[in-house]
Amino acid sequence: MSLTGRAPAPDAEYMMRDTSSHPPAHAPGYKTSVLRSPKLALISLQQSLSEVTAPQFRAEELGPLDHDLIMNYAKDGLPIGERVIVHGFVQDQLGRPVKNALVEVWQANASGRYRHKKDGYIGALDPNFGGCGRMLTDENGYYRYRTIKPGPYPWRNRVNDWRPAHIHYAISGSGWVQRLITQMYFEGDPLIATCPILRSIPDEEQIRGLVALQDTSAFVQLDSRAYRFDIVLRGQRATLFENAVNGGGAR
Amino acid sequence: MNAPQIKRETASQTAGPYVHIGLAPQAAGFDIFENNFGPVLVNDQTKGERIRIEGRVFDGIGTVLKDVLIEIWQANAEGKYDHPGDLQAGKAIDPNFRGWGRGCTDFETGVYHFETIKPGSVAGRNGRFMAPHINVWIVARGINLGLNTRIYFSDEAEANKKDAVLNLIEWEARRATLVAQRETVNGQTVYRFDIRIQGDGETVFFDI
């Protein structure tokens, strides 16, 4: 008997969040968090329908190039930089695929510059690169997109802090409690060792989980290298006993 | 019989200052997607009372934050979520209302807004009562793990008194941080909901 073999009821509750898997709200090494972190304890909720449901997305809502960061903003040529494929699986904590999850990604270009009106970094914009994409996972929880490897860039924290190359992710699964926003890094980047944002995570294993490994099995010959990045969302418990998330039932 | 291997949830990281590129590219200053997710949840056919929600987000010394992204998730006018997990009997999905929206605080004014409908009451856990409410998720530069809260409605005072979640908050004074104030502005119903991330009047955030 294994928990993973039993399908959870559609209204089943999710496993409690292990806060030690995440950076604390107040992480002084990342200076901006100091005034943007609640001081009071979060109030723990037993989940109701409000927490176990979430918006569901349809393939028709996304355009045919939304997942192709190399082509989705190309105006008069190809974007500059290293061509890479990023792929992986979105699973829950019990190893079940999270199907039809919305995966949204955004990043700087090869120069470390974001296409954003508030980014004033001297690194050049690339007229053929937007820097965002989105896709849905398939029935196996698999996602894949291609892009240009982002460059590192300096930011205002300590005087010489540089962000390691990274791609931002926002993932929407089947329950509101699964909503997750994170960043993916690239194996071998020397800036990983000192990044105050990455180091706000209190656990080496969890930090390693954000570092995508080069995946030669997915290289495209004479075209692109590949990186593998798997994501784990909160797990939905298989069975509810006396506790019913949905309306009825005794207390 | 082996105990199942429980994986750890992937670590969260801040949305950063340029979250708009990925989640609201038009706010970042460019057009890339044909279909953009935004703060308008309704169309002409949506059932229910039209409302606008607006407010600002403040940091620990009262600064208005202008780089925040907020998402809301709510039931329809009958109190039904558009999701297969909502098994409440006798309530129908509204095909013209998904119940999800995404908004940004304005780079100049710091005001965010949503155009939506007032949700109906959703049955709570184990048959407990929940007053009409909207679920809120807040991310921004400096927020390491998305913040969850709820919007309740000032004209639902009786229902709010019976709400299972508001009653969980043992500091009664803090419950008011979750109640949006109803106003009428130019004939439109507006609920004002300010969010204080830290310090005096700190909004109640939930570990869900």
Image (cartoon, helix red, strand yellow):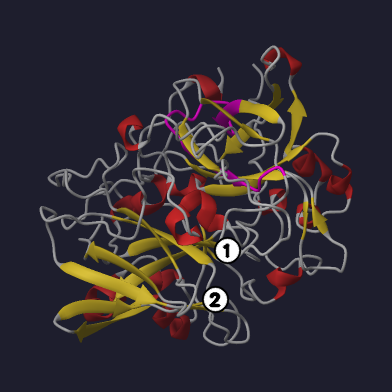
Q: What residue is shown at x 76% (from left), y 71% (from top)?
A: A31
Q: What residue is shown at x 17% (from left), y 48% (from top)?
A: B96
Task: Chain letter for mark 1, please.
Answer: B
Q: Secondary structure at mark 1?
A: strand
Residue B92 colored in magenta in the image? no
Q: Nearer the viewer, residue B189 or A146?
A: A146
Disc 1: CA contacts within 10 A as few (<14), some (14-19) or many (>=20):
many
* Quarter assignment of residue B122: bottom left
Q: Which residues are magenta?
A: A88-110
Q: What residue is shown with label 2?
A: B65
Q: Is residue B123 left or right of residue A136?
A: left
Q: Is residue B168 left or right of residue B83?
A: right
Identify which amino acid the numbered label 1 is placed on: Ala
The x and y percentages for residue B202 are 54, 80
Gap between marks 2 and 1, in whole Å?
9 Å
Residue A103 colored in magenta in the image? yes
Vertical placement of residue B15 versus A13, above or below: below
Q: Is residue A236 left or right of residue B142?
A: left
Q: What residue is shown with label 1?
A: B140
> Tag 1 or tag 2, which sits nearer the N-term?
2
* Quarter assignment of residue B197: bottom right
Task: Chain letter for mark 2, please.
Answer: B
Mark 2 in CB contact with mark 1 (< 8 angstroms): yes
Q: Secondary structure at mark 2?
A: loop
Disc 2: CA contacts within 10 A as few (<14), some (14-19) or many (>=20):
many
Note whether residue A159 is visible.
Answer: yes
